[in-house]
Amino acid sequence: MFITTQAPQDQQILKLVPIMAQASQILLEEYQNYCAGSEFNIDEKDDHSPVTQADLRVNQFLLQALAEITPDIPVLSEESDYSKRHEWRTCWMLDPLDGTKEFIHERDEFTINLSLIQNHQTIFSVIAVPTEQVMYIGYLTELPYKYSFSQKTWERYNKFKDAEADAIQIGLSHSSKNPKYQQYIDFIEQEIPIIRREAGSAYKFCMMLEGEIDIYPRFHPTSEWDTSSGQGLLESIGGGLVSLNAVPFTYNQRDTVLNDGFIAFRDKDNQKIALDALSNVTL
């Protein structure tokens, strides 16, 4: 849970907040125009995934803004050239619109993901939710903040001991039809009731921070910019995100930016449940 707090004094956070707020406003305007039926451009990338004018507009804004505040740090963005990425020990990792398919289907569960990678590890993370006018932001080594753009209020994650759960909340994508998900759920449900919560994109990581999802299994590939911010925020509260071999993801070191599947968990208790269930899935 998050509780009201004073604004942080950290300069990196204070510089990024207005930038991410403006990027969120740009994305929200694009979404509102799209839903209103205005002329809107959607193209297809080489991998056949969609890219919209909203992706590109937010990407352009953030590339310029980040270059102004951190000119020496390159940006590895989904929508830009990152062919020289292996030369970068430190870089920003950006997804200007995580949940493009949610956006296109007029579901408001899309985010902007930004993280700072150093020596292949996420050390700082931001996830902004434009339709809710909030962002989650913080360092790997500290509890994260939640900032409301509209209310201009700050909250901070508060670690507290949950009462023993009556059910486990499982986060699933709207398209989670693979039978592996049912195998996974069936195993957990032998011991404790399950609550299924469907949501799109990195929005599920925000739900985990809010205590609305305990475990998030993913049995199909993602890209590094899909997971880096969420992993950093989860690790900062004592949770985590690991591969299907139970190894935490590292970043900008493999030949590809594609990830295999993963299991994300909100805390250590849920980690055990999550990984025990994984052993029952035919991978």
Image: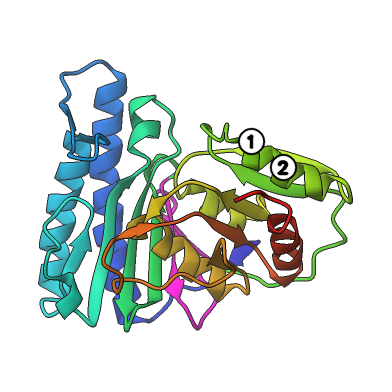
In this view, the residue farthest toward the front is 282
Kind of residue indicated by mark 1: Pro
Label tally: 2
Q: Mark 2, residues whose alpha carbon is within 10 Å: few (<14), some, or many (≥20)?
A: some
Kind of residue indicated by mark 2: Gln
Whole-percent x and y of residue 73? 17, 77
- Closer to the camera, 113 or 128? 113
Q: Residue at x 28, y 67 (%)?
A: 16
Which image quadrant: the N terminus?
Answer: bottom right
- Res 197 → quadrant: top right
176 left or right, relative to 229: right
Q: Distance between the residues labelled 1 and 2?
A: 6 Å
Whole-percent x and y of residue 129? 41, 48
- Residue 237 in the magenta stretch? The answer is no
Please determine whether, in this image, residue 254 is positioned above or below residue 19: below
Question: What label sits on residue 179 in the rendered view?
Answer: 1
- Marks 1,2: beta carbons within 8 A: yes
Q: Residue at x 21, y 38 (%)?
A: 54
Badge 2 marks a residue whose secondary structure is: helix
What range is drawn magenta here?
A: 133-156
Please determine whether, in this image, residue 40 is positioned above or below residue 3: above
Q: Mark 1, residues whose alpha carbon is within 10 Å: few (<14), some, or many (≥20)?
A: few
- Residue 143 in the magenta stretch? The answer is yes
Residue 145 visible somewhere in the drawing? no
Whole-percent x and y of residue 79? 18, 50
223 left or right, relative to 193: left
Residue 213 visible somewhere in the drawing? yes
108 left or right, relative to 158: left
| Residue labelled with disc 2 | 183
